[in-house]
Image (cartoon, helix red, strand yellow):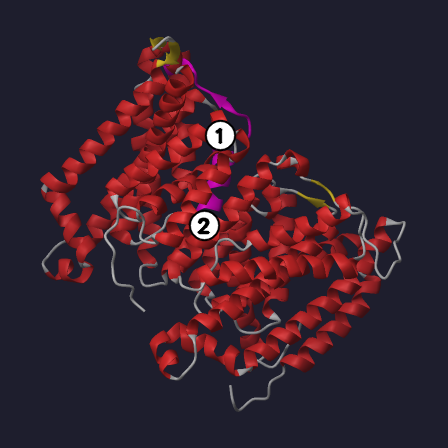
Amino acid sequence: MTASRDWTIPGLTIGLVVMLVAGVVLPDWLLNILNISFSRALAVLGLMVLWRTGLISFGHAFYYGLGAYTVAILGKELGVSEILVTVPAAMLVASTVGFFLGFIIRRYRDIFFAMLSLAFSMVLYGILVKTEALGSTDGFSVPTPSFLGFGAEEAADNKIVLYFVLCGIGYGAALLVHRYLQSTLGNLSTAIRDNEIRVEYLGYSVAHAIHVKYVMSAALAGLGGAILAISLSQVDPDSMVNWTISGELVFVTILSGPGSVAAPFIGSVVFELIRTYAFEWLPHAWQLIVGATLLAIIFFLPGGVWSLLARIFGRKEGER
Amino acid sequence: MDLLITILLDGLEFSSYLFIVAVGLTLIFGVMKILNVAHGSFYAWGAYAAAYLIGVVSNHGFTDLATMAMIPVAAIGVGVVLGAIIERTLLRHMYHLDEVIIVLATFATFLILEDTILLVFGVDPYFAYQPMAALGNVEIGGIGRLVYGLSMILLALAVAVSLWFALNRTRWGRLLKAVIHDREMASYLGINVSRVYIVTFVIGAMLGALGGAYVAPTVSVAPGFGVEVIVLSFAVVVIGGMGSIPGALIGAMVVGMARAIAVHQFPELELFVVYAVMAVVLVFRPEGLFAPAKARKI
């Protein structure tokens, strides 16, 4: 790894340019898929940061949902639809909650970490399902977003504006996370997974490092949820906060692999394509196909889709 | 007073079925260290199989009471077939993997089994009211109750007593305890750990299926049946202490009663209460209310 140059940043930049150019010609349905994939990829990016430490959260739909509902509530109650306001607000809410819960959750590992995050997310789910003001299980719709004050009339135009904004956000998030993983604190991830005591003896606080990661993953999941809410123009508990969604996020994390910050984006697109096609061809068996894919990944491709690409391209490509 | 009795009985009935499902989950976790998400599918499969068989048997002219025999048939059938298949083909090859990765694999199994239900039984809901109708009503303190619902409490007690007996008074129970205590040492002593695993998994699966099969007559069995119950039984198991059978009993009582009170007094808090209790227990006693504290391995 030390011998070869780090291609992540040029790779990401090439990826961004390709995606931006492609955005002009891509058909509408594909843009839709990409929008949804990239919003999920942001949450998965956060989970990947946690996973590098060996932690898997079975409740990150909590922050996903917090982000989504923040955007939706801002639009519904205050009439704010400006992406530059709603999306940072969603991130702020998610990271603040993550910061406070982080004090509790950073003490837990393994299955307890997974279960406690599950419990938190189900508490939110329980509240949302029973809150009639927020549409209970039906949820409610999110107003059409505007960007820098420009609101498009046509739904299709909106989609493409959102796509460009999303590409930018994804690029920025991936770069920042990459920078973080290269830093000392980021490099501690693997060390913590391997031996916590040794890390403590080196003079670093494991609890602090995990807390930072947790808040980061919360902010990213909030960001992803916010954008998902905007691209679906609808929020509801079952497709955003329920435990099956948390499971889905973890699934995409494993599918992508921890190899690179670009992996979640690729993995998420792969997942969405599998799901879309499976749903089209076998509407009653799409979960079966998704589940079988997950098993196949666990057994045959533990490094995820990224490891496959790395093998093919000799770990040079940083395609986004 | 009426309300109190209603809450108490509702709570007991709900706790009973939760206990039956969750004790299967906790048994599997205690012995194999697998938190089995697919347990929700065993539950759903049990419910579907029971509802389907009850319908078939009833159409062949059996009395409503006789259809009840289909409940254990469904539970045992689902437990043996699904449990054995999943343990042999899947879990067997994963014991060396990380705990959370195995959880994810069982999540994949859950997704697969969810759709297998749709493929086998279709998307239309099933109704199997016959056993419930056969047992009729009874009056307790001036309140009419379904005997079938009350019989669930007896079933849960029977399950609890037989599990206690099997674990503490039989050879199989001693083998199991040895395996729980130290898997490697147990295998050095000549215990067939692999067989203990599959037997445990099948029994756990049967209990999950039994919960579903017994609930089936009281509800409409529809797709997505196992989604909610799996997190509820996670809550039960976590509250009582993962892997502890008395813990599952306590956890089921706590969750069942909390939910019954919430349903009657504060309906908007129904689900919130259950998971809030789970979170609080995890925060203050991560090992659960009932499990003995263990040193954390780092």
The chain letter under disc 1 is B
Residue stretch rendered in magenta on the structure: B109-131
User: Image height check: is A206 above or below B70?
Assistant: below
Q: Is residue A201 magenta?
A: no
Which chain does tag 2 point to?
Answer: B
Q: Could you tell me residue A51's position as x and y percent? A: 48, 66
> Can you tell which quarter of the image residue A111 is in?
bottom left
Does residue A149 appear left or right of residue A212 in this picture?
right
Query: Is residue A318 placed above or below A66 in the rendered structure?
Result: below
Badge 1 marks a residue whose secondary structure is helix
As drawn, the label of residue B198 is: none
Quadrant for the C terminus of chain B in the image: bottom left
Q: Residues within 10 Å of mark 2 (few under 14, many from 20)?
A: many
Amino acid marked by disc 1: Phe
Q: Residue at x 45, y 50 (%)?
A: B107
Give the x, y percent position of residue B59: 42, 12
Q: Residue at x 55, y 66 (%)?
A: A305
Which sits in the foreground, A252 or B73? A252
- Residue B107 - label: 2
